[in-house]
Image: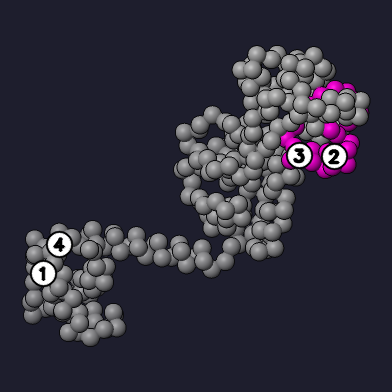
Amino acid sequence: MVNLDLYRVFYTVAKCGSLTKAAEELYISQPAVSQSIKQLENQLGVSLFNRTHRGMELSAQGGKTIFAKVEKALGLFAEAETLIARINDSAKGVIRIGASETIFRYFLADKIVRFHEEYPSVKIELISAVTPKAIEALKAGECDMAFVNLPIAPEQNLSLHGNCMRLSDVFVVGEKYADLAAKTQPLSVVQSLPLVLLEKNTVARRALDNFMDAMGVNLSSSIEVGSWDLMKRLVAKGMGVGVIPREYAQTLLDEKTLFEVKTDPVLPARSVGLLTSKTEPASFEMRAFVKLFDLDI
């Protein structure tokens, strides 16, 4: 096992050229320095110094061979200690979070408030973007992390860290079609009704279309919208049947403004995931924020 203390003593003696000066710099006794050098020489099986009247000189076959490597290694350890000290001092940097307005509203808002209360000196920048654009922003270095709707295709330079929030897609209707909520409906019934669906370029819409295709059901939208909020308003006004995560519609379902239509089979669950860059190290601020979700990056 590598004993770093022995290498620190070796490096200090080589730098000072004297056992006495090395002992003074290390705040240990000269015999302790001499004993450490002997221990390292025995461990390596080679003489590290030539002891001359001028002091301690590196031996050609021992000390000079390893000096540069030891100097570099100790330098790296010093850099690591400095980095940890800076991180542990306090969080005062910036954290840039990319996500859609919906994810910010229903999933991240409370966590952002909690984080700010714990780290008030950290500046928080919110980049509002749908999942594809949030991913591009992360790849371009415009944000530090992105919360995205899953599933997504793997990205070579991005890491996906677990599922942060479960999304249970359900069919919803307003009062006009409330009778559909009285019993479980086959999926085939839905395709004959006017549908209010998200735009085709969204992750949620692609997931819905893929599942329905697999079930042999063809969905043709009457209206396509760009946000869940607009979908909820239109469906509540009787424009047709919408598909939305129950978690995003729960308040209106509880108020009986919207009604859930149960289907057989049910729509598959999706989730929100966290993406970070593989090429950029995670800052203390990033790790502290992610811990709010019981994740580690």
Q: Residue at x 10, y 69 (%)?
A: 42
Range drawn in magenta:
235-259
Q: What SS does tag 3 mark?
A: helix
Mark 4–mark 2 distance (CA, rounded to whole Å):
76 Å
Q: Which residue is mark 4?
A: 64
Mark 3–mark 1 distance (CA, rounded to whole Å):
69 Å
Q: Is residue 64 above or below residue 97?
A: below
Check the picture and name the quadrant holding the N terminus: bottom left
Q: Amino acid at mark 2?
A: Leu
Q: Which residue is mark 2?
A: 252
Colour approach in the figure = one colour
Ranked by sequence position, the earlier of labels 3 and 1 is 1
Q: Which residue is mark 3?
A: 248
Ranked by sequence position, the earlier of labels 4 and 2 is 4
Mark 1–mark 2 distance (CA, rounded to whole Å):
77 Å
Residue 230: in sight, yes or no? no
**Contact? badges 4 and 3 (CB < 8 Å):** no
Q: What SS does tag 1 mark?
A: helix
What is the number of callouts on the image? 4
Q: Is residue 51 magenta?
A: no
Choose mark 4 or mark 1, whichever is in front.
Answer: 1
Q: Which residue is mark 1?
A: 42
Q: Is residue 80 above or below residue 218?
A: below
